[in-house]
Image: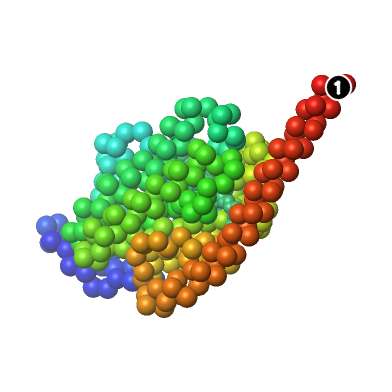
Amino acid sequence: MFFEFSCDLTHTYVRRDENSGLTLIFSNNFQVTGGSSGIGKCIAIECYKQGAFITLIARDENKLLQTKKEIEKYSVNDKQVVLCISVDVSKDYEQVENVLKQAQEKLGPVDMLVNCAGTSVTGKFEDIEVNSFERLMAVNYLGSVYPSRAVIATMKERRMGRIVFVSSQAGQLGLFGYTAYSPTKFALRGLAEALQMEVKPYNVYITVAYPPDTDTPGFAEESKTKPLETKLISETSSVCQAEQVARVIVKDAIQGNFNSSVGSDGYMLSILTSGMSPVTSITEGLQQVVCMGIFRIIGLFYLGSFDSIVRRCMMQREKSESADKTE
Ligand SMILES: NC(=O)C1=CN([C@@H]2O[C@H](COP(=O)(O)OP(=O)(O)OC[C@H]3O[C@@H](n4cnc5c(N)ncnc54)[C@H](OP(=O)(O)O)[C@@H]3O)[C@@H](O)[C@H]2O)C=CC1
Ligand SMILES: CCCCCCCCCCCCCCCC(=O)[C@@H](N)CO
């Protein structure tokens, strides 16, 4: 049996294990999938700075160890721990469950799980390899289902916990080039809504984050093969810094907000796509009611401009192709 003295994000809490008679010191224990790079790494740093214990989950061991070292520079007390787990979150549920359990044996039960492992492939529908559709769904969707499924029972038992799903603005609207990626991010929203309804009475809160384009190694990789149309459409809004995105996500998750967005486009998109998603406050609900119509009008202008980008690119391509032929 354990008993707790205090528990908030900035303080460690002490538990006495009745069986062993040992006094164990725990901090809030956060697990971050995709924690070795980009947004996930910044989320881990942000939480570590606030005193949490961190478990990083990703595949590449070298990247994990390097990130662990980087994060440890930000420690705020000498008891803080960064644990690394090398696992593919999308392959084998049993394996994911086992490694997350092992981490919890070391650090105590998980208080917050951030599902940030993910990847992207862009291109025209007919140009994207069929197995990329499967791989993206496995990593981005199932790779969030498995870790969440592995921790949810304990969270419900403890009547506390947070699960974050990192979707994308491309999980709020479908854009040219994102036929393989967008559906995986839309899927997270459905999962989050259904799960939130199940676990709310147990004091467990779900957050879905919809980041815009963010300057990360993953984004750089994606940009290498991005169609021109996708680039031009994406330039509508600017590229964010991963630190900023991470700060917003961590704040929203700790507050238990269902929805987390960054910037003014992000705000408009979230209001516009609020549909039947849960609200966290009356103010949030009121803002949706008041702003939805006007944002729809703004959105229609955006859609018009996206369509014209796509049409212009098509015409230019046809022109250059016919010029090639006559040469
Ligand atoms: N950057 C952007 O513009 C945006 C990103 N997002 C989303 O945010 C998340 C993070 O993106 P970003 O920081 O750019 O990505 P990065 O590519 O920089 O980092 C991805 C992380 O996920 C890990 N990962 C990938 N696949 C797996 C897997 N199968 N099992 C375990 N870990 C895995 C990687 O480590 P390893 O390869 O070693 O496994 C790495 O730690 C993604 O879900 C992405 O879709 C959303 C909106 C915008
Ligand atoms: C009224 C509302 C108007 C809103 C306009 C919105 C403009 C959208 C711009 C492009 C968004 C692309 C995000 C994809 C990010 C992503 O997930 C990848 N980079 C991952 O690597």
Along the horizontal axis of the image, is 270 left or right of 175? Answer: left
Q: Residue furthest right?
A: 327
- Residue 32 in view in this figure: no
Please provide percent x and percent y for residue 315: 74, 38
Please provide percent x and percent y for residue 198: 23, 58
- The amino acid type of the residue labelled 1 equals Thr
The quarter holding residue 113 reads bottom left
Count of numbered marks: 1
Distance from mark 1 CB to nearest ligand 2 atom below 8 Å? no
Question: Up-down: is 231 above or below 245?
Answer: above
**Secondary structure under badge 1?**
helix
Question: Up-down: is 207 above or below 87?
Answer: below
Of the pair 8 and 297, the residue shown nearer to us:
297
Question: Up-down: is 280 above or below 177?
Answer: below
Residue at (23, 73) in percent of width and height:
5
Image quadrant where one finds the N terminus = bottom left
Please provide percent x and percent y for residue 281: 37, 75
Per the image, the residue denoted by label 1 is: 326
Residue at (82, 24) in percent of width and height:
324
